Image: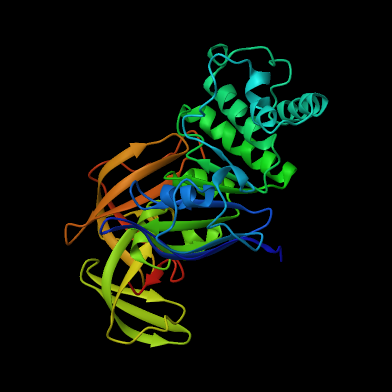
Amino acid sequence: MAKTLISIQNITKRFGNFAAVDDVSLEIAEGEFFALLGPSGCGKTTLLRMLAGLEMPTEGQILIDGQDMSRVPPNKRPVNMVFQSYAVFPHMSVKANVGYGLRIDKVAKDEIEARVREALALVKLDGLEERKPDQLSGGQRQRVALARALVKRPRVLLLDEPLSALDAKLREAMRSELAQIQEKVGVTFVMVTHDQDEALAMATRCGVMHRGVLQQVAAPSDLYEYPNNRFVADFIGSVNLFEGTLTIDEPDHAMIESEELGGPIHLDHGVTGATGATVWAALRPEKIAMAHRDEGAAAPQETNVVPGVVRHLSYLGNETLYEVEIACGRRIKVTRSNVARYEERGFSGGEPVWLSWHPRAPAVLLS
C-alpha cells in the first residue's frame, strides 16, 4: 500500500452562508491518479484550488507529505497546476513556455535546457521547441501546459478539466496519453472533471461530489457497479432506477416489490436492509436482455421478466439504445451491442418484447 501523500481533513469552504465544500475528508496516496468529479457547482474546483493554495479553507486542514499547508503560500507548495484554458504565453516559443517556471526559480541555464528537453520528449513535442502557441493544435497546446507543469518536478500535479477544450476524438486519444505519462513519471495526479467517461478511463480512484459533499470514493469499476446512493448511480453512466419495498431479505436471496415495475425484483443475495424499508434498484441498460415477444409465447424465464413495447431506438454505432415502455407507462433504457453487421431479426419501433435480467444485475440502494 503506497503511503498517503495528501490528507484532507474536515475541509469546509464557505462563501458567505454558502458552503461550497462541506466537511470533506479524503486521503490520496503517493503516485495515485485521483479524479474528483461531479456536476458544475458541486465544489470540486474549489477543493482543487484549496490544494493549490489559491483559496483558503474556512475550516479544516490540508496536509501534503505530512506538512500542514495552511501557512504555505501557493508558490512554495510542492504542487503545480494545469488550468482548463492551458494559460500558455502566446508571445513565447514552446521551449520558453516550458522553461518559464525554472527561469523564475533561477535554475542554472544548462539544467533548464536539459529538463525542458526531457519534458518535451515526455509529452512528444520534441522538434517543436521554436514554435509559438498559435502554430500548434489544441492537443499540442495542452501538452505544452502539461510539460510546463511537469518540468518543475512537483510532488502533486493538479489538473482542472484538462481535456475539456479538445474535440471528442482528440480528447479520447489524450486520455490514454495522460494516463501513460502519469504512470511513467510517477507523480501524484489530482484531476477535476465533470466527464464521467474521462474519470473512469484515467483514474485509479474517483471521488464523486454533490452540493459540496463527498458522496463516494472508490475505484472506477466499484463506482459503476456498486454505487452507494441514487445520486452516484445516476451520475456515473446511464441507469434505470426503480423504487420499491424490501419484502424479503435473507442471506442468500431477497425480493423488492416495485409498483413502478409492476412486479417483484428477485435477487440471489441478501441486502442487509430493514425488511419493509423503501429501497431503490439500480439496473444498468447493458445488463438488461431483450427478446422478441411473439403472440401467445410464454415468458423466457420465471423471474425478473417484464413485457414491454419498443417506443424509440437510437443507433450509436457500437451499440443501439432502446426505450421500452412497460405496462405502467414507464420507459426503460436498454442497450445492445452491435456485434454483427447484420442481424437477421432485429428490433423495431412498436414491437412487443420481453425484458429480463440476472438476479445479481441490480444494485440495491438504501438512499
User: Which image quarter: residue 20?
Assistant: bottom left
Q: Residue 246 versus residue 253: which sits nearer the camera?
A: 246
Seen in the image, is 304 located left or right of residue 343? left
x 58%, y 50%: residue: 203
Seen in the image, is 39 located left or right of residue 36? left
Q: Where is residue 271 in the image (x, y as percent from the top left)?
A: 42, 80
x 53%, y 58%: residue: 70
**Quadrant holding the C terminus:** bottom left
Q: In this view, does 28 lie above or below 250?
A: above
Q: Residue 37 versus residue 92: which sits nearer the camera?
A: 92
User: Which image quarter: residue 314?
Assistant: top left
Q: In this view, does 194 lie above or below 129?
A: below
Q: Residue 271 versus residue 212: which sits nearer the camera?
A: 212
Q: Position of residue 73 (x, y in %)?
A: 55, 48
**Quadrant holding the N terminus:** bottom right
Q: Is residue 45 above or below residue 68?
A: above
Seen in the image, is 342 located left or right of residue 303? right
